[in-house]
């Protein structure tokens, strides 16, 4: 049984409509915070996510950066891959939270979230990325 939780909250603001606040508690045994700098033009910078070594271990992942560079407006230069540098890149255009449901889907696909690989395709702007992982200990 998890010992604690992390709380994710924010406001969803549709272009036409009223803001909708949300809060989600993610139960977990522990959490980890890692900061890395993904230099301009760097590809597949490996970040070990200790504590989340099996597909069912990670129950939440939050990614945020100090900048989200775009060479072409609307096309993020910052991206990441989960598990292996050969997996599909996921664009990072702003803070992102992924909960346990997606990690469960990764497990079904045989992808363990033990590593993240960051790429910054921008030619001149570095990005400092903070990785927060909530996980359960078996």
Image (spheres, helix red, strand yellow):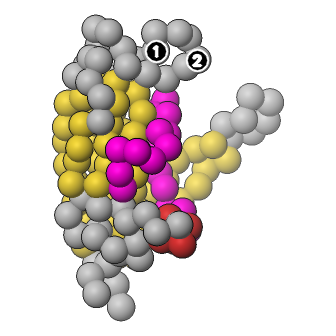
Residue drawn at the location 34% of the way across and 24% of the way down: 120
Q: Secondary structure at mark 2?
A: loop
- Mark seen at residue 109: none
Q: Position of residue 16 (x, y in %)?
A: 80, 30
Q: Position of residue 68 (x, y in %)?
A: 40, 23
In this rendering, position of residue 98 left or right of residue 116: right
- At 74% from the left and 28% from the top, the residue drawn is 15
Task: Using the rendered view, name the quadrant where residue 42 is placed.
Answer: top left
* Label placed on residue 74: 2
Q: Residue furthest bottom?
A: 1
Question: In what element is the residue under mark 1?
Answer: loop
**Against 4, is 22 above or below?**
above
Q: Work out which residue is located at the far right of the displayed protein and give it.
A: 16
Mark 2 Cα-neighbour bin, 10 Å: few <14, some 14–19, many ≥20:
few
Residues rendered magenta in the picture: 83-103
Residue drawn where x is 66% and y is 37% of the image: 13
From where the camera sits, is residue 4 visible?
no
Where's the C terminus, which quadrant? bottom left
User: How dense is the environment of label 1, judged by Cα within 10 Å: few (below 14), some, or many (20 and up)?
Assistant: some
Q: Mark 2 near mark 1, Cβ–Cβ under 8 Å? A: yes
Residue holding disc 1: 70
Residue 69's spot in the image, x, y percent? 40, 17
Relative vertical location of residue 62 with respect to residue 18 in this rendering, above or below = below
Front residue of this view, candidates 87 and 137: 87
Could you tell whether 63 is left or right of 15 in the image? left
Judged left or right of residue 137, residue 17 is: right
Any magenta on residue 116? no
């Amino acid at each position: 049984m998890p010992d604690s939780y992390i709380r994710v909250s924010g406001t969803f603001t549709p272009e036409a409509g009223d803001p909708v606040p949300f809060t989600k508690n993610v139960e977990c045994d522990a959490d980890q915070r890692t900061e890395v700098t993904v230099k301009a033009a760097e590809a597949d910078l490996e970040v070990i996510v200790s504590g989340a070594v099996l597909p069912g271990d990670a129950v939440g992942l939050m990614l945020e950066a100090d900048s989200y560079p775009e060479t072409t407006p609307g096309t993020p230069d910052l991206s990441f891959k989960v598990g292996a540098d050969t997996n599909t890149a996921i664009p990072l255009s702003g803070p992102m939270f992924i909960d346990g449901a997606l990690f469960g889907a990764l497990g079904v696909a045989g992808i363990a979230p033990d590593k993240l690989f960051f790429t910054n395709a921008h030619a001149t702007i570095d990005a400092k990325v903070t990785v927060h992982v909530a996980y359960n200990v078996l």
